[in-house]
Image (tube, rainbow, N blue to C red):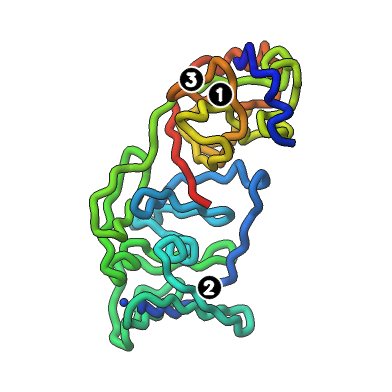
Amino acid sequence: MKEDYQLHKFTKGLTGLAVSLTVLAAGFLSPFTAKAAEMDVKVQVNDDLVRFPDAQPFLDDNHSTQVPLRFVTEKLGYEVDWKKVGNQVTVTLDNSHHTVTLISGQKEALIDNSPVTLDTPPQFQNGRVYVPLRFLSNTAGIPIQWDSSSKLAILSNDGQHHAPDYQVFESTAYSADPSENGGFGAFDFLGNRLAVGTVAVDPSVIPLGTKLYIEGYSYNGLPQGGMIAYATDTGSSIKGNRIDIFIPGSKQALRSYGIQKIKVYKLSE
């Protein structure tokens, strides 16, 4: 749906909190290899959505949000230090004058060597220790709110109230057909090959190169639940709060996508 696409598009550019716990080292996926990451439960720090590249938050049996600790604490600005002993890693986070020790599967924890009981225990899954977000926020003294409509936990690290950081956009779909791409075929405005996760935007609304998380669409040619996307394409008909989503397939087949309302979150690197 990007008819009358610009012909020059292809030439545009080929106090200290110390937390000790058992956890395995985190790994990161590079851009354009992790576009299909699902984020059923999401975490926002102030106005920024936290990206979890390879281990996602989830609601446990007690309806508590469990999060991979490292990604949240880095977003909160903690200095992270860790050392591996055997198959265990001791992680230290500097931001106040407390020492918190957590063990996966146990509700008992230590804060400055004083025992406390958690409402729900940390969990070890797929090589990661997940920590109850509420416990982490309470220990650090950071207010937290829950937006049930988007399954979004918002940490107010600055003490201010923050609304869910997404906007509702109209979305359409386009293919690699040259008639939808200014005659150039399977390349975006920045010269990248079109792939799942490529979206066309109005650069005055979403700057080119912005990393996004989008959800709310319904189409079996896209990742279920939601996906990481990159604003690397434009189109003469893409104006205002509208996004065109690239989907592999024929121009005719993609007409069934129609026009759908989606939620769009901007992700910082």
| Residue 244 disc label | 1
Point 53% across, 27% down: residue: 201
- Which of the two labelled residues, at mark 1 and mark 3, occupies the earlier sequence position? 3
**Label 1 vs label 3: CA separation?**
10 Å
At 43% from the left and 75% from the top, the residue drawn is 93
Name the one closer to the observer, 106 or 54. 54
Indicate the amino acid at tag 2.
Val
Question: Is 94 located above or below residue 178 in the figure?
Answer: below
Instruction: State the residue position of label 3.
Output: 239
Query: Residue at 50% of width from left, 52% of height from top?
Result: 51
Q: Secondary structure at mark 3?
A: loop
Viewer-nearest of labels 1 and 3? 3
- Relative image position of residue 214 (x, y in whole percent): 49, 36
Report, in whole angstroms, how far the alpha carbon at label 3 lies from the one at label 2.
45 Å
Q: Which residue type does callout 1 highlight?
A: Asp
Disc 1 element: strand
Q: Is residue 122 above or below residue 108?
A: above
Quadrant of the snapshot with the N terminus: top right
The amino acid on which the numbered mark 3 sits, given as a three-letter code, is Lys
Q: Residues within 10 Å of mark 1 (few under 14, many from 20)?
A: many
Residue denoted by label 2: 23
